[in-house]
Amino acid sequence: MADSIKDRVADAAKNAGNAIVEGAKDAKDWVAEKTGMGQKEGCAPGSGRVEERMDVIASCGKKVGVVDHVEGGAIKLTRKDSPDGQHHFIPMGWVDHVDSHVHLKKNSMETEQGWKADASMCGTCGS
């Protein structure tokens, strides 16, 4: 009888430990997604490679820019295709998927309100 109680306590402790590990992994993934960090440079999650001259399309379908290049975990948009003639940076964490275009998780208004003037500022960008 004492052995069965020990076994149940050991199983409960093991299950609790597994739940903590799984929760920590989920938290790490959540933070990486929200900050745009943890992505390999130039790669979007579960998709193709972000390349120069690709159109960047917001979730609402509006084109918000063209890729100049990837810099420090952020996509630098060309000045020529910018509404204000300036470079803008968006975190890789905002990328939903890549095919012949870069598709974002954010709509155009959210994208334009949240883009940054410098790639280093994208480490603090939320998703």
Image (cartoon, rainbow, N blue to C red):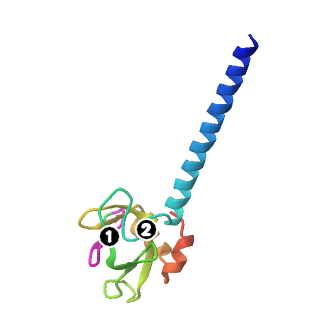
What kind of residue is marked 1? Val
Tell me the SS state at disc 2: helix
Vertical position of residue 88 compared to residue 105: above or below:
below
**Number of residues whose C-alpha sits closer than 10 Å to that of mark 1, classed few (under 14), some (14–19) or many (20 or more):** many
Vertical position of residue 30 compared to residue 16: above or below:
below
Q: Position of residue 25 (x, y in %)?
A: 55, 49
Which numbered circle lies on residue 50?
Answer: 1
Q: Residue at x 61, y 38 (%)?
A: 19
What kind of residue is marked 2? Met
Q: Are marks 1 and 2 in contact (CB under 8 Å)?
A: yes
Q: On the image, numbered disc 2 is attached to which residue?
A: 92
**Frontmost residue, 71 versus 13:** 13
**Residue reaching furthest right?**
2
Tell me the SS state at disc 1: loop
The earlier-in-sequence mark between 1 and 2 is: 1
Vertical position of residue 59 compared to residue 27: above or below:
below
Vertical position of residue 114 compared to residue 28: above or below:
below
Which numbered circle lies on residue 117?
Answer: none
Image-quadrant location for residue 126: bottom right
What range is drawn magenta here?
Answer: 50-60
- Which quadrant is the N terminus positioned in? top right
Question: In this image, 104 relative to 6: left or right?
Answer: left
Image-quadrant location for residue 108: bottom left
**Frontmost residue, 72 versus 57:** 72
Most common secondary structure along the magenta stretch: loop
